[in-house]
Amino acid sequence: MKFVSEFRDRETAKGLVDAIHKEVCSDERYRFMEVCGSHTMAISKFGIRSLLPDNVELVSGPGCPVCVTPQWEIDAVFRMAEEAVIVTFGDMLRVPGSNGESLQKLRSEGKDIRIVFSPLDTLAMAVKEPERDFVFLGIGFETTAPTSAALAKSARMKGVENLYITPYSKTVPEVLQVLLDDESLGINGFVCPGHVSVITGLSIYEPVAERGIGAVVTGFEPLDILSSVLELIRQTNSGSASVVNMYPRVVRPEGNPKALGLLDEVFRKEDTDWRGLGSIPGSGLRFNDEYSSFDALRYFEIESSGVYDIDVCRCGDVLKGKMSPKECPLFGDACTPVNPVGPCMVSSEGSCSAYYKYER
């Protein structure tokens, strides 16, 4: 298949749904977690949950990069905004701080908050206005971390000294192990992130399969997701877990060696904090010594406050698959996309946002 329409073919989808219903064992419970915000949105948008047998559950995990950013890192951005120009993707604009502030609110009050589509736009701004400090919000997983690395490398080559980057990028393999360590989650398999896998390749999922849990890399169209669910059901039934690439049109087994090399050049792995999950060893990307002058936390002398979540917000439980968005007492009432309490409702890849938009 070459075109998007082919991956949305109704008859093929019906065949996959029929196959799923035939494959499931009535006395078995299947609980699969997607760890990609784009998968979360696609599952809700195409109504895939409603097509599955009652004993097949798709739960959202920590796959939205804005959502997993702990509260202290969000709050640190507001402090930087007092002294520097903040440059960010649009997703961050309405994410609330501990005191109800947001970048959108700060911008309305006169702070210089700029939206970009490419991190490299920040470099042009910093060169043009050397008298001001610029902070690019480097938030994401292995998918976007290479762009932050490229920004730092380009700035270093040009000798730019008024540009900083928040080292908030996180990596996927470590959080998968933390999720598997929590037996109360009862995960039978992972729908693995296609975008991350483009960079990393497939080897990062081998430890998951070695623990007897299936890991299927897939795309974002209905047939992609239904095929991956069928594969995970079959693996669960057979008791033989493996890593399967069902997105070969985009993902190569070895990933993107050039991007991986760039990550190794600019970053090193360190412990980092996740909303809802606390500190996870080796799951953060921090600047190597050679690039440490670009570290915004270092420049503004910001340390962890230890605050991961807003007290009343249940985003942490949603991100761990312990609660569906609809089970949150704030969902759709005190917390809406217009007036979000937590990032899962405001981010375009957040679980609560997906449920509010497509599954209310």
Image (cartoon, rainbow, N blue to C red):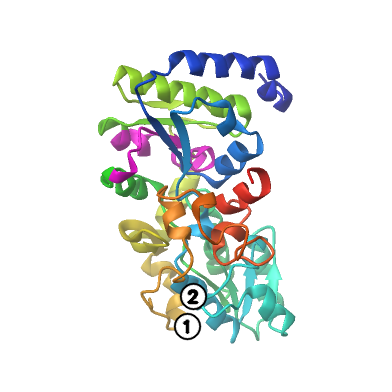
Whole-Å distance between the Cαs marked 1 and 2? 6 Å
Looking at the picture, which amino acid does disc 2 mark?
Answer: Ala
- Picture layout, residue 62 above or below residue 109: above
Tell me which segment is drawn in magenta. 184-208
Looking at the picture, which amino acid does disc 1 mark?
Answer: Phe
For the residue labelled by badge 2, is the local secondary structure a helix, a strand or a loop?
helix
200 and 113: which is toward the camera: 113
> What's the residue at 64%, 84% (across, down)?
132
Q: Is residue 111 magenta?
A: no
Which mark is on residue 296? 2
The residue that label 1 is drawn on is 300
- CB under 8 Å between callouts 1 and 2? yes
Left or right: where 195 falls relative to 188: right
353 and 151: which is toward the camera: 353
- Picture layout, residue 234 above or below residue 62: above
Q: Quadrant of residue 84?
A: bottom right
Which mark is on residue 266? none
Helix, strand or loop: magenta stretch = helix
Residue 19 in the image: state x and y as whole percent: 52, 14
Q: Quadrant of residue 332?
A: bottom right
